[in-house]
């Protein structure tokens, strides 16, 4: 059986970078009422990484279940894919990566954990997702740049920041303004975040692509 794969992404990993890992049909972040068209076109493997949030209708549970019932293998991770996979893995959707596991295990729950503002033309993120901030602040704590109390306070500040306004510059600046960290530590932390920040969404997006690649190879055997 010939495998035909489609990947919905653009925020967590660019189409250009994704193509270096997997040859597939790359589409912008998925939106409501879109999957059926690809099922009808014969796509039998789908990778859902990014999707529309908030301002337009997100991909629905029923349409993913419908694709699964049609025999399509659906892999999700990193962003919208992780959220939907955590809700639909019992129906056969394949979830991969850290963000999926966090949603599945109830460590995180809110949609805005993975939400970002994006450039409408390139889909490139112009804000930092909370899941990335979580991992980066944790790494800064491990590296001894911030204390446990500073880590907790800064994470709370990040959680309470509206998702389009989340940035490392904004977080460290506001943290210093509120007295959560010193000015000297602010500069050191910002440098760490910018140069050594952990992009967990990208890491998970790569896992989705690698999983889809494996499924494609197995389908074509």
Image (spheres, rainbow, N blue to C red):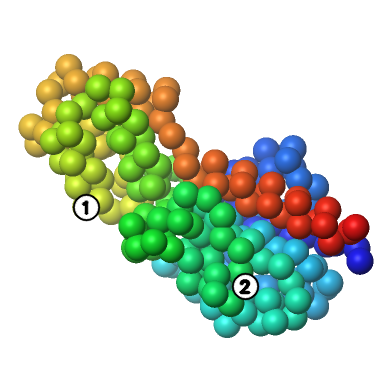
Q: Is residue 190 above or below residue 122?
A: above
Q: Is residue 208 above or below residue 188?
A: below
Look at the image and tell me whether residue 119 can be seen. no
Left or right side of 75 for 201: left
Whichever of callouts 1 and 2 sits on the residue coming sooner in the sequence is 2
For numbered disc 1, what is the local secondary structure?
A: loop
Instruction: Pinpoint residue 108: horizontal percent, then vertical percent.
Output: 34, 58
Q: Residue at x 28, y 53 (%)?
A: 162
For numbered disc 2, what is the local secondary structure?
A: loop
Q: Quadrant of the C terminus?
A: bottom right
Q: Residue at x 76, y 45 (%)?
A: 22
Q: Between residues 14 and 98, which one lies in front from this camera angle?
A: 98
Q: Quadrant of the N terminus?
A: bottom right
Tell me the residue that label 2 is attached to. 92
Q: Between residues 16 and 147, which one lies in front from this camera angle?
A: 147
Q: Residue at x 56, y 60 (%)?
A: 95
Q: Is residue 142 above or below residue 214?
A: above
Q: Residue at x 23, y 43 (%)?
A: 155
């Amino acid at each position: 059986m010939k495998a035909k794969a489609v990947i919905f992404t653009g925020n967590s990993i660019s189409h250009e970078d994704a193509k270096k890992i997997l040859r597939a049909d790359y589409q912008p972040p998925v939106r409501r009422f879109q999957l059926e068209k690809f099922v009808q076109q014969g796509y039998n493997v789908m990778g859902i990484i990014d999707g529309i949030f908030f301002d337009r209708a997100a991909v629905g549970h029923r349409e993913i279940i419908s694709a699964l019932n049609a025999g399509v293998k659906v892999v999700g991770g990193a962003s919208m894919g992780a959220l939907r996979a955590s809700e639909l893995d019992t129906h056969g959707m394949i979830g991969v990566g850290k963000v999926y596991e966090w949603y599945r295990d109830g460590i995180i729950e809110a949609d805005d954990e993975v939400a970002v503002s994006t450039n409408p033309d390139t889909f490139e993120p112009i804000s930092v997702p909370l899941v990335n901030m979580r991992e980066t602040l944790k790494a800064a704590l491990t590296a001894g740049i911030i204390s446990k109390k500073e880590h907790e306070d800064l994470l709370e500040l990040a959680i309470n920041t509206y998702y389009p306004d989340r940035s490392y510059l904004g977080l460290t600046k506001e943290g210093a303004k509120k007295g959560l960290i010193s000015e000297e530590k602010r500069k050191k932390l910002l440098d760490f975040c910018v140069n050594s920040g952990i992009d967990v969404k990208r890491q998970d997006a790569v896992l989705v692509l690698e999983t889809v690649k494996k499924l494609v190879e197995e389908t074509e055997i």
